[in-house]
Image (spheres, rainbow, N blue to C red):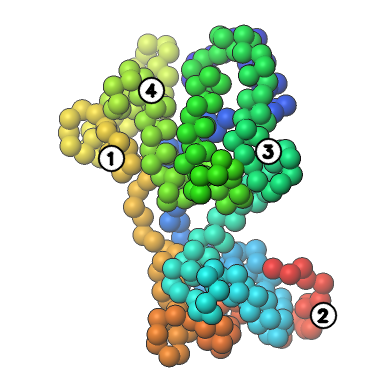
Amino acid sequence: MEVHSVVCAVLLLCAIVAQGKPTLRKERVHHDQAELSERPHEDNNSFQYDHEAFLGKEDATTFDQLSPEESKDRLGKIVDRIDSDADGYITTSELKAWIKRVQKRYVYENVAKVWADYDLNKDDRVSWDEYKQATYGYYLSNPEEFEDATDQFSFRKMLPRDERRFHTADLNGDQKADREEFTSFLHPEEFDHMKDIVVQETLEDIDRNGDGHVDEDEYIADMFAHEDGGPEPDWVKTERDQFSDFRDLNKDGKMDQEEIRHWILPKDYDHAQAEARHLVYESDQDKDQMLTKEEVLGNWNMFVGSQATNYGEDLTRNHDEF
């Protein structure tokens, strides 16, 4: 990474701290199908894997402390939230969406922490103008102070890029982002409809000669700055081999957008889909491939469980609602 001048670094730091910050990101490979629990998925009566997949690790621990009655009561409320179209049935796709949301709860918590910084008029929406003012307001008022900033941190480059991403996240096209849309804007790698943007931004980050492709030297330069002129470390040589053997799929000496997609968005095993199917299969009494609230509650121990009978009823008090 190039070294900034002290003046530019201070100005950029002040602007970023005082305002928001552009959506610059360095991580390249995104695995959105991570294992749902560290516990083994065993066919026994503990169901710990299922609990952590359905609730998340922290809430699974909380539910373990509840009485069966309270555990089932909270599960019923969760079922109502999972049933997104309120038709009285939980489909595999609705259950999968819930599991994926639970597993990336940290993303939503992160957005909740910064929401007030961007929702300037407190209407529970973030408009593009609000985001632009919160993030780029200082730059827009004092553009001359940023003339010497490098391209990587150039607000002039990042503003139209963020605007493009914002409009992609704005699914209903009303120029405002609700919390779900704003979450997809700040964390596009977590949302299927934003994957093209992730690929495009990665290409633009690495493609130094602007030819619309990433060659081997550009690929290496993204992770290693060869400043002293000495021999390359062994790990860099390994990455060159990775490029030729696994990144450049058509062997034309460069990566196009599809090859970049294959690299940064690998098609992993869909753990959420598998778990959703498993829960439906094990709980679907009438075999219509959907679950009613009664069917879920009838198999409540697989979804949430309870170990409170081993600890005493005092453990069931003073718990916040899920």
Label 1 element class: helix
Instruction: Identify residue for label 3.
Output: 118
Instruction: Identify residue for label 4.
Output: 221
Gap between marks 2 and 3 measured at Cα:
42 Å
Residue 43 relative to residue 7: left or right: left
* Residue type at tag 3: Tyr
Residue 92 relative to residue 20: left or right: left
Gap between marks 4 and 1 measured at Cα:
20 Å
Label 4 element class: helix
Gap between marks 1 and 3 measured at Cα:
34 Å
Of residue 239 and residue 93, the one placed in the foreground of this image is 93
Instruction: Identify residue for label 1.
Output: 258
* Residue type at tag 1: Glu
Q: Are marks 4 and 3 in contact (CB under 8 Å)?
A: no
Label 2 element class: helix
Which circle, 2 or 3, is nearer the viewer? 3
Query: Looking at the rendered structure, which numbered label has been put on residue 165?
Result: none
Q: Are marks 2 and 3 in contact (CB under 8 Å)?
A: no
Give me the residue at 42% from left, 19% from top: 225
Query: Looking at the rendered structure, which numbered label has been put on residue 314?
Result: 2
Whichever of labels 2 and 3 marks the residue nearer the N terminus, that label is: 3
Residue at the extreme front: 174
